[in-house]
Image (cartoon, rainbow, N blue to C red):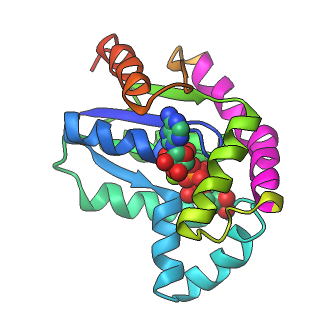
Amino acid sequence: MLNIVLFGPPGSGKGTQSEKIIEKYGLIHISTGDLLREQVAAQTELGKQAKEIMDTGELVSDKIVIGMIRVKLEENQDSPGFIFDGFPRTIEQARELRKALTDYDERVGVMISLEVPREELVKRLLKRGEETGRSDDNLEIINNRIDVYNRQTIPVTYYYDKMHKHAAVDGIGSVDKIYSRIVEVNGKVKK
Ligand code: AP5
Ligand code: MG
């Protein structure tokens, strides 16, 4: 299996690049943000709780997201691998992912972090907010999402650094150019 963690701040292009990566490698895409938005749209109890938190830009509890990940792993045991988009976002989530994959004799092959400066993130997300109406794409929440990322999520890079799995990729440029940088990193990863 090939298991990739696609990491980076809000608006860094995780979702955009995931679409291209799954096409090339046939991986299952697991975006915790998308899974949570599905719950919100279906108006489930979990969705109602999550929406309140997502509308502030804070993180939903580790327990909820880890539970969703475990269900997806269980459902897709025969897949050639997974791309984790927007997960793990805390050290606790990184530890739990390791445990969950170990249950299937699997591990994370590489953690690719897309590096994009704050001004560019804000610009991209404001534009997306206008185009799609995603409810957390407004200036106040965008700023909090980036602050939360810097405070709570950046430490996850140190976790993968220690295991020599962290590869930083420049996330500025055309979508295709960034994708080719990711493919190059991936080519160097032991499967
Ligand atoms: P989530 O859905 O993960 O959102 P996010 O991290 O804020 O990231 P985005 O989806 O906004 O950005 P992206 O990196 O995917 O970029 P994209 O490709 O879309 O999380 C939402 C919320 O859910 C969180 O705030 C939290 O509350 C909760 N949550 C989710 N996961 C959680 C977890 N694990 N634990 C706890 N809580 C969790 O691109 C952005 C825009 O830029 C698009 O319009 C795109 O077209 C454009 N773009 C992409 N690439 C380029 C480029 N190269 N040049 C110019 N524009 C570009
Ligand atoms: Mg996304």
State the image quarter where residue 134 is shown: bottom right
Asked if residue 76 is positioned above or below residue 17 in the image, the reply reads below
The residue at the point 38 percent across, 42 percent down is 18
Q: Position of residue 88 (x, y in %)?
A: 57, 44
Q: Position of residue 13 (x, y in %)?
A: 51, 40
Q: Which residues are magenta?
A: 141-161
Side of 183 where 164 appears, left or right: right
The residue at the point 38 percent across, 27 percent down is 179
Side of 52 where 94 appears, left or right: left
State the image quarter where residue 171 is shown: top right
Asked if residue 104 is positioned above or below residue 181 in the image, the reply reads below
- In this orientation, does residue 85 appear? no
Asked if residue 41 is positioned above or below residue 126 in the image, the reply reads below
Side of 137 where 141 appears, left or right: right
**Nearer the observer, 92 or 4:** 4
The residue at the point 72 percent across, 46 percent down is 122
Image quadrant holding the N terminus, namely: top left
- In this orientation, does residue 45 appear? yes
Characterize the magenta stretch by its predominant secondary structure. Answer: helix
Side of 121 where 26 appears, left or right: left
Asked if residue 48 is positioned above or below residue 105 in the image, the reply reads below
Q: Is residue 15 magenta?
A: no
The residue at the point 42 percent across, 32 percent down is 175
**Nearer the observer, 68 or 113:** 113
Image quadrant holding the C terminus, namely: top left
Q: Residue furthest top?
A: 188
Q: Position of residue 139 (x, y in %)?
A: 79, 58
**Nearer the observer, 10 or 43:** 10
Q: Residue furthest left?
A: 78
Q: How many marks?
A: 0
Q: Position of residue 10 (x, y in %)?
A: 64, 46
